[in-house]
Image: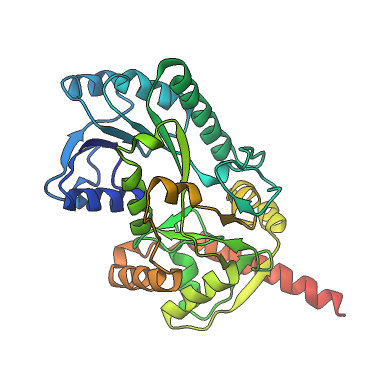
Amino acid sequence: MKALFIGGTGIISSAITKQLSENGCELYVLNRGNRSGSLQENVKVIQADINDEARVAQLVADLQFDVVADFIAFHPAQLERDFRLFNGRTKQFIFISSASAYQKPLSDYRVSESTPLANPYWEYSRNKIACEEYLMKQYRENGFPITIVRPSHTYDERSIPLGVHGGKGSWQVAKRMLENKPVIIHGDGTSLWTMTHNGDFAKGFIGLMGNLHAIGEAVQITSDETVTWNQIYAAIADALGVKLQAVHVSSSFLAACSDQDYTGGLIGDKANSVVFDNSKLKRLVPGFAATTRFDQGIKATVEHILAHPELQIEDPAFDAWCDKVIDVLQGAIAKFKE
C-alpha cells in the first residue's frame, strides 16, 4: 500500500505511522518538518506547508496514492484545497473528524454513527461537521472516495488525558497531585467517558485503509471501555503513586470563571455521558478490539512523562486559577454553614 499522511506526528497519527512503517507500507508524510526526527527511517518525508498549495501540487505532481489522510484539517476551506490537490490522485481520502460533533445534548447516551451531528456549544465541532458535509457532497457529486473517521478522547505517552487542564497541557494537574494539592473534576465526576490509547486507535484506522467497504462512510474509532471521570482521575493518581484529592465543580461554573474554552470542551463535550457503539467499525474491520485498558495505558504514559522532563511543562497561571476556584467554592460552603 502506498499512503500519504498530511501531518503524521500527532497524538493520533504517530501510532498509525509507526505501525504502518513496521508493516512494510510505502508511507509518505507531508509536514513542515518540525517533528520529522520522530519518524521511522523508512518513512518518506515531503517537507512543505500544506497551506502552500502551489508548492505541494508541484511536490506530488508525479505521485499516485492508495490512501491520502489529512490529520490537520479543521475548516472546509482546507478540505476544498485537499480536493483540488488529490482528486484523481488517490483511491481513498480519509478525513479525521471528531466525536465531539455528535448531538449535544445527547438524546441517548449510546453513540453510533447514526447519532445526529449538532453541537451549538463548540465552534471546533461545528467546523468538523461542515467539513464532513463538504466531503459527502464531493463523494455524491464527484465520486471523491472519502472515508470519515471520528475519534473521541485519544491519548499517547506524551500527555495525560484530562477533563480540566490549562492552556499549556495537563502536566500541572499531575504536579498538583504530586504536591498533595486538590485537583478539579468537572461535575460530580460520575458522567461516563471513553479513553482510547492511540495504539488501539491505529489498529482500527489501518483496518479502514484501502477498505472498499469504508468508502463513503463515517466510522468512529474508540475503545469499548467506559469509565467515570472519578475513575479516570483516580487511575492517574494511582499511576503517580499518590492519593487523589478531588474537588468537584460544576461545568457551567468552570466555564463562567475561566478564559479557557470550557463551554466547548466541557459543556459541548466532556461533561456529557457517552457510551460508544463500535459495531460498525467491527463489521468493517473484523477482529478489531481495543486491548489497552485505561489504568494500564495511563501508567505507561505517566512513566514516560516522569522520565522526560521536557514534557513536564508547568502552567503557573492555571495553577493559581485552580487555587482561586477551590478557595471560592470552599469559602461559599463555609459561609453557608455560618
Quadrant for the N terminus, please. top left
x%, y% of residue 63? 18, 25
Measuring 28% from the left and 30% from the top, which residue is drawn there?
49
Q: Is residue 336 above or below residue 285?
A: below
Q: Is residue 62 left or right of residue 256?
A: left
- Colour scheme of this structure image? rainbow
Judged from this view, the residue extending furthest toward the left is: 41
x%, y% of residue 110? 62, 53
x%, y% of residue 292? 39, 66
| Quadrant of res 36 | top left
**In-front residue for pair 286/148:** 286
Measuring 73% from the left and 69% from the top, which residue is drawn there?
329
Quadrant for the C terminus, please. bottom right
**In-front residue for pair 33/213:** 213
Judged from this view, the residue extending furthest toward the right is: 338
Measuring 47% from the left and 20% from the top, which residue is drawn there?
140
**In-front residue for pair 176/235:** 235
- The number of callouts visible is 0
